[in-house]
Each structure stands twice: as C-alpha cells, then as structure tokens.
Image (spheres, rainbow, N blue to C red):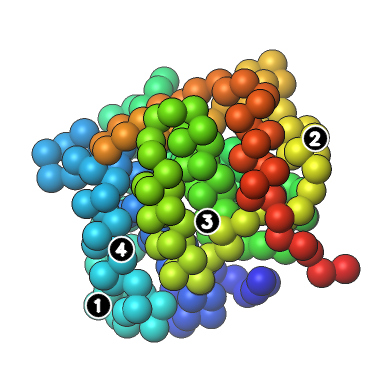
Amino acid sequence: MSNSAYDPVTAVDEAAATGETARIFADIRSTMDIPLITSIWRGLDGIENDLPALRACQPAELTAGVYGSCRIKSEVVASDEREAGRRAILNFGHTFGHAIESGLGYGKWLHGEAVGAGMVMAADLSARCGRIDTARVSRLEQACERAGLPVRGPAWPAGRYLELMAVDKKSVRGVPRFVLLDGPGAASLQTVGREPVVATLEALATEVQPA
C-alpha cells in the first residue's frame, strides 16, 4: 500500500483517487433519491466503463469524476445539514474502513484503500442480512478490485474489529452501526447482530499484513 499523499492531479496515488471516485459513484449514487440516479447498478455501469481512464489518470475522466463526486456529496449534505439521518449514507463502508485505519495506524493504508475493503465488507454484510443478493456483492467487489483497491481487510480476529468498531463515531453506547445496502437505490444505517458481522469478518478479514 502506498503512503503517498492523495493527489489525483499529479497521480501520486492513483488507487486512492480511483477509490474515492468509485465509492461516490458506485455506492453513494445508489442512495440518492433524485430522478436520474435510481440504482447502484446504474452507478456501477458508469464507474466500470471509466475505470481504465481513471486509473490512467486521464484529465477529462478525473475532472468529471471529481466534479460528479463533489456534486453528489454536496446534494446529500445539503439535504441533511444537521446529520439527522440521510447524511449517514456517505459513510458506506466506513465502519469497517475506520476500524482498519485505526488498527493499522493512520497512513498505513490510505483512506480510499480502507474504505474500498470496507465497502466490500459492508456489501457482504448487507447480503448476510438478506438485503441484497450475492451477485450484487460480487459485482461491487470486482469493480473495487479493478480500481486497484483492497477487497479484504487485515487478518485480525473478529474481536479486534468489534473492539475498534465500538468506538466508531456511528456507534451507540459501544454498539457499532453499519450503512447497509437495501437494494437498488436504497441504503440505511442499521444495528446488526454479532453473528452476521462475525461471519463477514471471518470471510473477508484475510489480508495478511507484512511484519
């Protein structure tokens, strides 16, 4: 993993730049309730087509990606300025991602890398909770992998993740909450029982870290 600063213009960190764009277009778009953005898979169509150009840091595609990401995020924030509900969707993948960043030490993985793995883990958890099918999880995982992002978390015991997630800003009295996909065009912030969370971690927390 790179320790370089996030700088899509000079492509110091192409994977992180692509990761942030992929997160916005593939996942935040799925939660937007505006007419032209109705499905996570419509968003994925765009990001899948643009991935080669984004990874090559082509100026036109990067400009469009950054502009579109900022526009979508600003619309979500404007609709929930006091963080009363909907704004939480911007944290898709972040409960797992923040645990990875905190456990490794900030800077070991870049934010986009940690959230990339976190998105796959959150999608897997969504499927285990019966909210989406596994085919959609696989498609998101493949898109993140093509973007050059990790799709597995560090190989820690589930208890370590739960300990780190208990202090996440979205947790309530030490109980972590997760942004889960509810199907095409929908997501929500949920408390989930221990069993499916542990199952997700056992399946996807398998990345062995260098000593």
Element under disc 4 = helix
Q: Secondary structure at mark 2?
A: helix
Q: What is the C-alpha distance between the residues marked 3 and 4?
A: 14 Å
Q: Position of residue 87 (x, y in %)?
A: 39, 32
Q: Which residue is mark 3?
A: 116
Residue in view at x 71 percent, y 21 percent: 174
Q: Give, as a three-letter code, the residue at label 2.
A: Gly
Check disc 1 and report the residue beneath it: 60
**Is residue 71 in view?**
no
Tell me how far mark 2 sits from mark 1, CA to CA. Answer: 44 Å
| First of labels 2, 3 by sequence position | 3
Q: Report crowding for label 4: few under 14, some 14 to 19, many 20 or more residues within 10 A (C-alpha).
A: many
Q: Is residue 152 above or below residue 53?
A: above
Number of numbered tags placed on the structure image: 4
In the figure, is residue 175 to the left or right of 42?
right
**Element type at mark 3:** helix
Residue, disc 4: 47
User: Nearer the N terminus, badge 1 or badge 4?
Assistant: 4
Q: Which residue: 46% across, 36% down?
A: 127
Labelled disc at residue 159 = 2
Q: Amino acid at mark 1?
A: Ala
Q: Earlier in the sequence, mark 4 or mark 2?
A: 4
Q: Are marks 2 and 1 in contact (CB under 8 Å)?
A: no
